[in-house]
Image: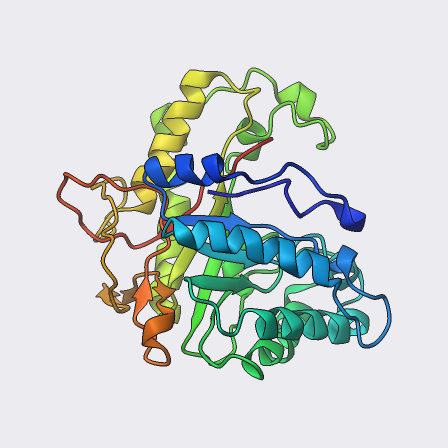
């Protein structure tokens, strides 16, 4: 579950406040992970040593503590680092410095925590530039924390297609991520920030061809995960409420169904995650995505990042794990 709009406003603009009852509702609903977007760039000095405002670290830590008190794992992101997209080489020192400070602050974290190095890397930064930056940026975290789970997406907006060009550094504690919004004209119809989106209003979803396209997309993601032997995390997916509710429900169900097949065969099988700690295991060569358990580091017996569970059902293990986007 994404906690969008809390700390990810540009220029240190604060959004809505996460209250205890929000996290209670998330946990009671069966979610086991929250993704917390933060625009760290807006809280950092613009010149060396790029020191972060301690108040944002305190505020983020408070939310983490409340999440961990409810046994929720947290993925902490780097949102709206616009300088990185525009000038990767010129901004890499600041990106590394910020991540090093975050890693230092949470090195002794008592709950399950992962770092997402950059939300939706995108042009003008190219895949080659992002791949070249990754060892340096990851190194900033590893200088402080050798075993922290780190989340990385491809440089074309973390889409499924971006995986084709993603070259991950050698590291045993990485998680690849994708954000899934296809077909875009359906999920983003009427989006006020998207040029031309008003013309997409009325787009429905549900015929066999629509379902087959989603299945094909997610099968491609699983195939990449199997080849790369890196777990896969669907960090965002969703359809705006301008689409008709029936189509939104059908699309969400189909994405969920195809994202949690225990032994991926296309549109077959559903699952709900187990809650017990488990090591990364093979599912046709692809490791099941999971979170580290701080009490078991450095062996990194992980806990799973997932969105929903059904406590009274048989629980096959998913090939992909995912988080649903919230819009506020």
Across and down, in percent, residue 159 comes to: 54, 50
Residue for point 36% across, 77% down: 297
Pinpoint residue 321: horizontal percent, then vertical percent: 36, 51
Q: How many marks?
A: 0
The x and y percentages for residue 51 are 77, 70
Write down the quadrant of residue 165 in the picture.
Answer: bottom right
Say whether residue 130 is left or right of residue 269.
right
- Residue 308 drawn above or below residue 206: below
Front residue of 245 and 207? 245
Residue positioned 70% across, 53% down in the render: 39
Tell me which residue sits at (27%, 40%) in the image.
267
Q: On screen, 27 above or below 137?
A: above
Q: Nearer the viewer, residue 262 or 210?
A: 262
Q: Quarter holding the C terminus?
A: top right
Q: In the image, what residue occupies the spot 63% across and 65% down?
A: 127
Q: Quadrant of residue 193?
A: top right
Q: Nearer the viewer, residue 258 or 296?
A: 296
Vertical placement of residue 67 versus 325, above or below? below
Tell me: 4 left or right of 284.
right
Residue 283 seen in this snapshot: yes
Residue 37: image x %, image y %? Answer: 60, 50
| Residue sticking out furthest to the bottom | 143
Q: Does the image show residue 213?
A: no
Near-viewer residue (106 or 319): 106
Q: How are the residues colored?
A: rainbow
């Amino acid at each position: 579950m994404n906690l969008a709009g809390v700390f990810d406003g540009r220029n240190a603009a604060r959004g809505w406040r996460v209250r205890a009852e929000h996290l209670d509702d998330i946990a009671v609903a069966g979610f086991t992970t929250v993704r917390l977007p933060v625009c760290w760039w807006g809280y950092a000095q613009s010149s060396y040593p790029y020191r972060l405002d301690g108040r944002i670290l305190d505020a983020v830590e408070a939310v983490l503590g409340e999440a961990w008190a409810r046994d929720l794992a947290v993925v902490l992101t780097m949102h709206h680092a616009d300088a990185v997209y525009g000038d990767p080489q010129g901004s890499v020192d600041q990106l590394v410095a910020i991540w090093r400070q975050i890693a230092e602050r949470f090195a002794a974290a008592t709950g399950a925590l992962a770092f997402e190095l950059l939300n939706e890397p995108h042009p003008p930064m190219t895949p080659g530039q992002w791949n070249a930056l990754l060892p340096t940026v990851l190194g900033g975290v590893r200088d402080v924390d050798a075993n922290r789970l780190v989340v990385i997406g491809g440089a074309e907006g973390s889409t499924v297609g971006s995986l084709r060009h993603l070259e991950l550094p050698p590291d045993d504690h990485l998680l690849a991520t994708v954000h899934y919004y296809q077909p875009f004209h359906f999920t983003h119809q009427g989006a006020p920030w998207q040029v031309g989106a008003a013309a997409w209003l009325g787009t429905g979803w549900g015929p066999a061809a629509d379902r087959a396209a989603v299945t094909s997309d997610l099968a491609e993601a699983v195939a990449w995960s199997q080849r790369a032997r890196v777990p896969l995390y669907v960090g965002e997916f969703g359809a705006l409420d301008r689409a008709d509710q029936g189509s939104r429900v059908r699309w969400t169900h189909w994405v969920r169904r195809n994202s949690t097949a225990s032994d991926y065969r296309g549109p077959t099988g559903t699952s709900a995650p187990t809650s017990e700690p488990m090591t990364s295991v093979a599912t046709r060569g692809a490791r099941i995505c999971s979170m580290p358990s701080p009490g078991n580091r450095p062996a990194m017996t992980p806990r799973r990042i997932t969105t929903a569970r059904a406590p009274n059902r048989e629980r096959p293990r998913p090939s992909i794990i995912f988080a649903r986007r919230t819009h506020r």
